Amino acid sequence: MDLNFTPEEEAFRSEVRAFLADKLPARLSTKVATGKHLSKADMQEWHAILNARGWLANHWPEQYGGPGWTAIEKFIFENECALAHAPRIVPFGVNMLGPVLIKYGNEAQKRHWLPRILDGSDWWCQGYSEPGAGSDLASVKTQAVRGIDAEGDHYIVNGQKTWTTLGQHADMIFCLVRTNREAKKQEGISFLLIDMKSPGVEVRPIITLDGEHEVNEVFFSDVRVPAENLVGEEDKGWTCAKYLLTYERTNIAGVGFSVAAMEQLKAIAAKQRKNGRPLTEDPAFAARMAKVEIDLENMKTTNLRVIAAVAGGGVPGAESSMLKIRGTEIRQEISSLARRAMGPSARPFVAEALEDGFDGQPFGPPYAAAAAARYFNNRKLSIFGGSNEIQKNIISKMILGL
Amino acid sequence: MNFEHSEDRRMLADSLNRFIAEQYAFETRDRIAKSPEGFSADIWRQFAELGVIGALFSEADGGFGGGGFDIAVVFEALGRGLVVEPLLGAVMAGEAISFAGSEAQKGLLAEIIGGTTLAALAHDEADSHYALTRVQTRAARSGDGWVLDGAKAVVQQGAQANLFVVSARTSGAVNDEAGLSLFLVPAKTPGLSVRDCPAIDGGRVAELSLDQVKLGADALLGKEGQALATLERAVGRGLLALSAESLGAMEAAKTATLEYLRTRKQFGLLIGSFQALQHRMADLLLEIEQARSAVINAAAAIDADRLTRERALSAAKFSIGRIGARVAEESIQLHGGIGMTWELPLAHYAKRLVMIDHQLGDEDHHLQRYVALGKELHA
């Protein structure tokens, strides 16, 4: 039993810290720390910086451009990035599609798409959820019909995807489509890559309750997709879908985000005043903070235990469901406390204050601008990636055997 | 990073678990827990022979363990078996003697490890409500020695112990940090009387009354008036022990409840197929894993600097207090009516889980302490 990192891992951590100190633009980390919205260019800038260092696709095998890190090194990297308020890597190409192509793609697909993910030529988005297929993902209805014409083998796609994160920036979308309506639910699904510039693709924004444009609806009307864009076998897309969902779940707890948010919360609570005293000295608030801090300290170790089991040859299966549930609950609780810490100043909502170039007079303390919006935005955490209730179903089936 | 126990600790855990499974079945435990002595002298002797007590002490003290994970491994096994024998007293009294004792006083450690001396920490008082500094029992100098007057409450196995480590105030007001002293008081000392009763979670607890208890100069453990650090260390090891014991009991309660969900039928279906119950069980699993992490954190911190150690201990005791009660309440609920009966072992695990929150500080106490220690950290 040893809870310390090895000297090699500590050296790696120092290397990551030095890299972040040197290469993470302060302009970006300030935006992340203060809850401001990142532009497409901001996200592309960070993507390019990581790629230049060879640290972008950290879940890919070395032969495809991954850094060859252990599970613990990945954990350290992700945590250090979160603590430094680095922008999140837009995951759809790098962390989701990449591993699927590497596992199920043919040689031509790997040669064509993987380098373009790395160099940022294609911005990918995810076409999974539909209005009628949320937690029940296998009931997707978007239809792809195969045909051959003068221009070759192709699919014609009709249907609708939703909750498409950052789809407004995307060049490409990977989709679960139904290619066989006769087969059982999971067995008639295919995994298809679609060019967002194809005629018949329409993106409409969904504005979330915090006023942000983060997600979209994507409509497909007779969209022609070359058959070579099918990944894996026709009607076997559910295999790819599941692999993508279960792949790389070690960071699902988001411990690094929580640690960074907890530090911010403490700093803010020390500045806020109640009855002339720092809010940290208010017994009720101090108790709320201590409870979530203790839960987070426990979660750090739970997360490392799961990672150590992976590193030791074990398989993280349903354990990642535990990490997802409690990790997201902790993140939500911290953002809830950050909102509470603002008192009445949580209410003023100047949407422009979260955008670049705003130089207006803030209402309340400067750090109040994003608190409530971030809290409302974080309600998504327990819904996406398989709602926490779905995760409990998984635990109950896979771990408890009920 | 390595979450595997060493080979030695795995062997210790295996042999202890096996011993408990073979010699400490529920019927035996129930009989022992209800007996007039509240423990089994025979089982106690076997624990000593197996080296279970020795595992709680360092080699320097005559044991062969004494690390945080030694304590954790032993007490998790004890918790799984719902063992009532007084190992907690050995840990806490032993740590006080080891940390503050003179060479002559440390001679007692061999007797504790050998099982011939049953030691208990007599610190809590009727109105102390877990506060470490709130001591009304007084010790006054008398010639070369001391005279103690006061009362101690809820001393674990107090009627069977033959040695007490008693806290008393040698100076200062009732809540002062300074002025606390510890004394070694043999059970047969004139003026010391013991009145005991069964505990709701098994075993027995006692009230000690000290009426002009005369002690020699050699009874003082450590420096006069400076016992708080010793008490904190002794209680700290107790906190780790109780947290690990709770974890073992939680695992046993979880196993029993899962088994019930997999066998009990209603409406023609296994009740484990109902989502309302599945989700509650999934929550318990998650909470128990968090409790395990809390125990690991505390065990890893047991030899760290004071603030790191005490914060980890309070975090653990808060966590297991909160989670233990939840596991107890949910396990009873998921069992339905049968969960309310004495004949069901689970009910006794539930009682122990809840009562652990009443030893050495409950959830609220340790949450407040964690906050206070955090302020010291940032001061």
Image (tube, coloured by chain):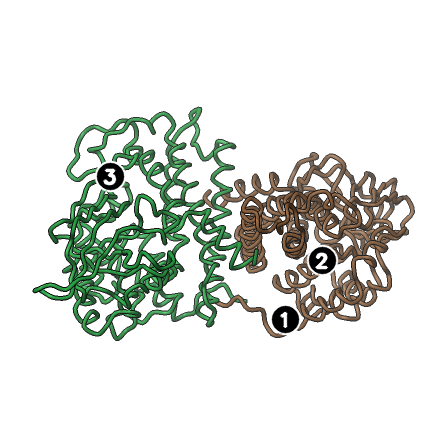
* Label 3: element kind: strand
* Label 1: element kind: helix
Task: Name the quadrant of the C terminus of chain A.
Answer: bottom right
Point out which mark residue A206 bears.
3
- Residue B10 visible here: yes
Q: Which residue is mark 1?
A: B10
Query: Which chain did the renderer colour green?
Result: A
Spatial separation of the CA atoms under disc 2 and disc 3: 61 Å
Is residue A355 shown left or right of residue A130? left
Q: Of circles 2 and 1, which is in front?
A: 1
Residue A364: x and y, percent?
A: 29, 27
- Residue A77 visible here: no
* Label 2: element kind: helix
Query: Which chain did the renderer colour brown?
Result: B
Q: Of circles 2 and 3, which is in front?
A: 3
Q: Amino acid at mark 1?
A: Arg
Q: Amino acid at mark 2?
A: Val
